[in-house]
Image (cartoon, coloured by chain):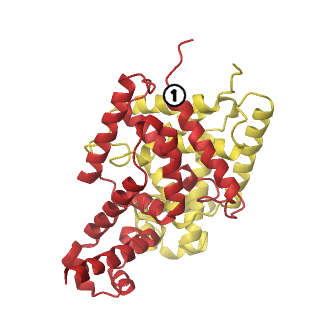
Chain colours: A yellow, B red
Amino acid sequence: MARDSSATKARLLDAALTEFAAHGIAGARVDRIAEAAGANKRLIYVYFGNKEQLFDHVMQRALEAGAESVPFDVEDLPGYAGAIFDHLVARPELMRLVVWKQLERPAATPAQEGAYAAKIDAVTAAQRAGRLDSAFLPSDVLTLVLALSQAWFAAAGGPATEPDGSPWSEQRRARHRAAVVEAVRRFTAPARHT
Amino acid sequence: MARDSSATKARLLDAALTEFAAHGIAGARVDRIAEAAGANKRLIYVYFGNKEQLFDHVMQRALEAGAESVPFDVEDLPGYAGAIFDHLVARPELMRLVVWKQLERPAATPAQEGAYAAKIDAVTAAQRAGRLDSAFLPSDVLTLVLALSQAWFAAAGGPATEPDGSPWSEQRRARHRAAVVEAVRRFTAPARHT
């Protein structure tokens, strides 16, 4: 029984991720999620609560998976930015989820706040030790690194496409990745005293 | 008569901007736009076409106003990034419009493509003349500059808020603006041959 319910939960969360990524929170339909998961709609309310709470569960699961795949490394912010880029490009539905969240449910969850505070502490310590440039506030370092990692999604002509609308080639994507990594390296490197 | 219709058009476009910024394209209601503008709903179809075409008109008008307020300056990309930041922070509904567009209508319009091509040409020329670092593709330069200008919207804890959810103070915002400008300066400066 316990195994069955955890399998159903996982199927519901997978279906919800697909639905939210496509339609956002207001546009998502709980009926479609239940149908795609082959589960009774009532179970969504039993397991997760209302639609907004379901979204929070989906986001939390995505963030946990992301933190496992791409651990934060304050000693190598350029590499961290490249790894975020890889993770999001491989799972474009996550990027859409993140952007819907910005529009429809911008407040940070307690788990997000905790993860963020831990990163702030790590950046602060690295700045004090002189391994990161101290010209920027730790929160600006994190915000700008993340923005560079996600820049492809807001590229002119739409997410990861050429200006004419055709999808990026693998070479083009690799070139953009290198640009992200190099941009992070340049702006976070400790200032040289000349 | 001509003056009346142009005033009605402007009222409809203003109301549509507010509606699209709040609800996106799928979530926008043409009825609400007509009511807010004090105009007949039928006029929206007469003047602009369907809801998607109305969105394109709103976006085009916003981009034209943006290009007038913040002219592209390839000789001063850090200053350009700061000016975009100011423009978007002062008009947060524009930033939301841009993000809804990424999700719901990502393809570039012909006017966007034209404006983008002109910027690419300017960056290419500046790189050839050695006034911009040539390590990056022109399209990556533009994408990363824009991402840094807009980073505040995706900041942890939601758009332009502290991690605890309180709005940024003016000092905090000024500090972030300086970080954006400095980050752009660092990553676009011509490489020094050492």
- B155 w.r.t. B28: above or below: above
Category of crowding for the residue at label 1, using alpha-carbon neighbours closer than 10 angstroms: few (below 14), some (14–19), many (at least 20) = some
The residue nearer to you, when weighing A36 against B25, is: B25
- Residue B75 image-quadrant placement: top left
Image location (x, y in percent) of residue B89: 54, 59
Q: Amino acid at mark 1?
A: Ala
Which quadrant would residue B1 be assigned to in this image? bottom left
Residue B182 location, x and y as percent?
59, 38
Question: Which SS class for mark 1?
Answer: loop
In which quadrant will I find the N terminus of chain A?
Answer: bottom right
In the picture of the structure, the residue carrying the numbered disc 1 is B189
Look at 29% across and 66% down and name the residue there. Answer: B57
Q: Is residue A171 something that shows in the picture?
A: no
Instruction: State the image quarter where residue B101 is shown.
Output: bottom left
Q: Residue furthest top?
A: B194
Q: Quadrant of the C terminus of chain A?
A: top right
In front: A12, or A161?
A161
Tell me the residue at 49%/31% (across/down): B188
B1, above or below A31, in the image: below
Work out whether A74 lies above or below B29. Answer: above
Specify whether B54 is left or right of B147.
left
Q: Is residue B120 visible?
A: yes
| Chain letter behind tag 1 | B
Residue drawn at 30 percent across, 79 percent down: B7
The spot of residue A28 in percent (x, y) is 44, 69
Count of numbered badges drawn on the protein: 1
